[in-house]
């Protein structure tokens, strides 16, 4: 009961906008989880953003956009840790991407693979299977999936559609790092 009371107090102490984010993200995580379990990836991919090869990219954002994106990432992680279903990296990236789209904040979503013998965070996995990871960046910051993302080789990159279709980017493409 004490655990529930702490979570309730934390929720009540949030700003109203963040409370709405938590409720919205909770339901979006359920939709994303159901989609991942039932649909082939080719049907999910268009909802991740505009596919842009497998390059590492950087998008330019204002300090205000970056701060809001970091807060969205924090609330996304908080919500994902409190769902009754698994809400791991791809689901978290999808959740945050939906809110970033709403606020017109440009993002880059990466999908990567690595041998499972790679060290991820504080744990080491001992078999030789491939494992996948998803992470979302805004400007120079990783918003979701930061833990261990460097151990993964990028196999696919998705960007906010506004990045490829903005007036600025008609003159130049996103910056590959």
Image (spheres, rainbow, N blue to C red):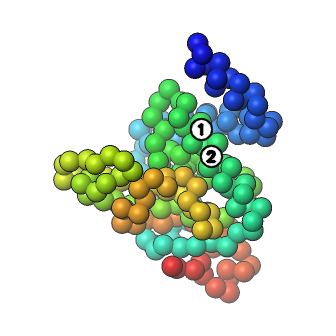
Q: Relative to residue 94, is residue 89 drawn left or right?
A: left
Residue underneath mark 2: 74
Q: Is residue 99 above or below residue 106?
A: above
Residue 23, image x and y in percent?
68, 33
Q: Relative to residue 112, is residue 99 drawn left or right?
A: right
The picture quadrant where one finds residue 173 is: bottom right
Residue 156, image x and y in percent?
43, 65
Q: In this rendered view, identify the residue nearer to me: 142 or 51.
A: 142
Outermost residue to the top:
1
The residue shown at (19%, 49%) is 127
The picture quadrant where one finds residue 113 is: bottom left
Q: Is residue 116 above or below residue 55?
A: above
Residue 14, image x and y in percent?
75, 35
Q: In this rendered view, identify the residue nearer to me: 26 or 82.
A: 82
Q: Is residue 19 visible?
A: yes
Q: Count residues near mark 2 (Cα–Cα under 10 Å), then give few for <14, some for 14-19, many for 20+.
A: some
Q: Secondary structure at mark 1?
A: helix
The residue shown at (53%, 73%) is 57
Residue 78 bears which disc, if any?
1
Q: Are marks 1 and 2 in contact (CB under 8 Å)?
A: yes
Q: Secondary structure at mark 2?
A: helix
Q: Relative to residue 130, is residue 177 drawn left or right?
A: right
The residue shown at (49%, 55%) is 146
């Amino acid at each position: 009961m004490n655990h529930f009371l702490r979570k309730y107090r934390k929720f009540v102490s949030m700003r109203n906008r963040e409370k709405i984010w938590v409720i919205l993200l909770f339901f979006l995580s359920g939709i994303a989880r159901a989609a991942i379990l039932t649909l082939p990836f080719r049907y999910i991919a268009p909802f991740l953003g505009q596919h842009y090869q497998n390059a590492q990219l950087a998008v330019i954002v204002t300090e205000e956009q970056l701060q809001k994106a970091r807060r969205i990432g924090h609330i996304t992680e908080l919500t994902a840790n409190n769902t009754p279903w698994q809400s791991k990296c791809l689901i978290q990236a999808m959740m945050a991407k939906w809110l970033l789209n709403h606020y017109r904040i440009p993002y880059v979503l990466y999908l990567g693979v690595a041998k499972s013998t790679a060290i991820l965070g504080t744990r080491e996995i001992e078999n030789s299977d491939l494992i996948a990871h998803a992470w979302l960046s805004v400007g120079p910051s990783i918003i979701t999936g930061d833990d261990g993302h460097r151990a993964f080789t990028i196999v696919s990159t998705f960007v906010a559609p506004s990045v490829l279709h903005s007036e600025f980017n008609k003159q130049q493409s996103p910056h590959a790092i």
